Image (cartoon, grey):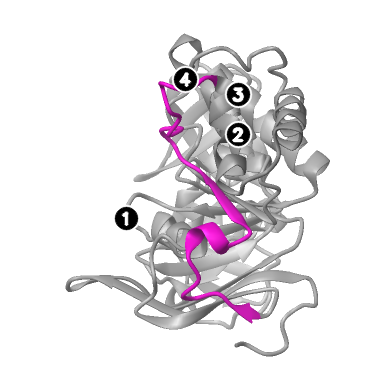
Amino acid sequence: MKKNLPSDVLLNLSDITKSYGKNTILKDFDLYIKKNEFVTLLGPSGCGKSTTLRLMAGFEKPDSGNIYFEGKDITNLNPEKREINTVFQNYSLFDHMTVGENIAFGLKIKKKSKEYIKEKIDYALKLVNLEGFEDRYPKTLSGGQKQRIAIARAIVNEPEILLLDEPLGALDLKLRQSMQLELMRLKNELGITFVYVTHDQEEALTMSDTVVVMNHGVIQQIGTPEDIYNEPKNAYVAKFIGDVNLMDGSVISKTSVKIFDHVFECTDEGFYPGDKVDVMIRPEDIILVQPDSTKVTGIVDKIIFKGVHYQMRVNFESHSFLVCSTLPTPVGSKVGLKIDPFNIRLMKKEDNNI
């Protein structure tokens, strides 16, 4: 087991390797989850996030490495003996059972008393705002109601960790946003640890305390949503999280970088003259100004209304910038581009594990 972990670590995956045939999904994988954390595993399909969740739940066993729960090795412990429950994308409700019977399923296996089960069903339905639904059948429920019943079934077992494998993927946008708020409320009320799997960047940034960005079974970065968005470790993370202008650059001095043969001031430290870097500028960090007030000018080539802002493409010599603004600028307009040095993020190219 890894040493020098924080005292509040609940689950620890140490040196995990997992393969299916010749396809290695995870290799020398290390990750720990702290108590009462909302952790999101974020990445594209096939990056290893669902495999990681299945290893936590005990549905899969690692080829090598160990899994610890509160310091105890649970690598070979069966799923039903772990203090961990899973909510799946397809809900996995039993159609021939009522809502109450679905929620009680795990408690009956544990041979809990009828009084205890009734009390837990009432508690769980109240918690997910579905009081009075115990005699309904799953086929009569909406997608959002089914999802909440699946969550209720998991939480009545009082797990220390609740695993959620892309549980909102089948819901429409408004319902998905509503369920995001519900999950955040439940996590705070229950005081348990949530581990959430998604490929949706908005979900990850909205709900998480900690985001784990993965690609090809490798953790690219772990951090708060703010850190992941504002301070990506490499070009992969920068491109995967939100819209971005990503360009090749060359460091000129401690306070300047050359992009497109133009020198821009910047504030990032740890770089030296001559370093080849990836340069990130978020579209919302570019301000359109009068063309005679700056050396960098361009022509608005495209504009899209996004609801809360306008997204514009500004051609700059033989290149282009993506710009977001609450004020529209007509296509064909000549504009100046103002970029605060603080908003120019430099990343070492050798850090890119893509």
Label 4, on which residue? 304
Label whose residue precedes the other's in the sequence (1 or 4): 1
Q: Which residue is mark 3?
A: 100
Q: Amino acid at mark 2?
A: Ala
Give the percent coordinates (x, y) of residue 52: 45, 62
Q: Nearer the viewer, residue 348 or 239?
A: 239
Element type where label 2 sits in the image: helix
Residue corresponding to mark 2: 104
Amino acid, disc 3: Gly
Which residue: 58% across, 38% down? Answer: 203
> On the image, which quarter does residue 299 sit in?
top left
Give the residues drawn in magenta, as a range. 72-98
Do callouts 2 and 3 mark residues in contact (Cβ within 8 Å)?
yes
Residue pointed to by mark 1: 46
Q: Is residue 157 above or below residue 227?
A: above
Numbered disc in front, either 2 or 4: 2
Q: Give me the C-alpha separation between circle 1 and circle 4.
A: 32 Å
Please say whether residue 20 is visible from this viewpoint.
yes
Between disc 2 and disc 4, whose residue precedes? 2
Q: 239 or 167: nearer the eye? A: 167
Image label count: 4
Q: CA distance from mark 1 to mark 3?
A: 36 Å
Nearer the observer, 326 or 178: 178
Mark 1 and mark 4 residues within 8 Å of each other at the beta carbon: no
**Type of the residue with mark 4:** Ile
Q: CA distance from mark 2 to mark 4?
A: 50 Å
Cα separation between marks 3 and 4? 48 Å
Q: Secondary structure at mark 4?
A: strand
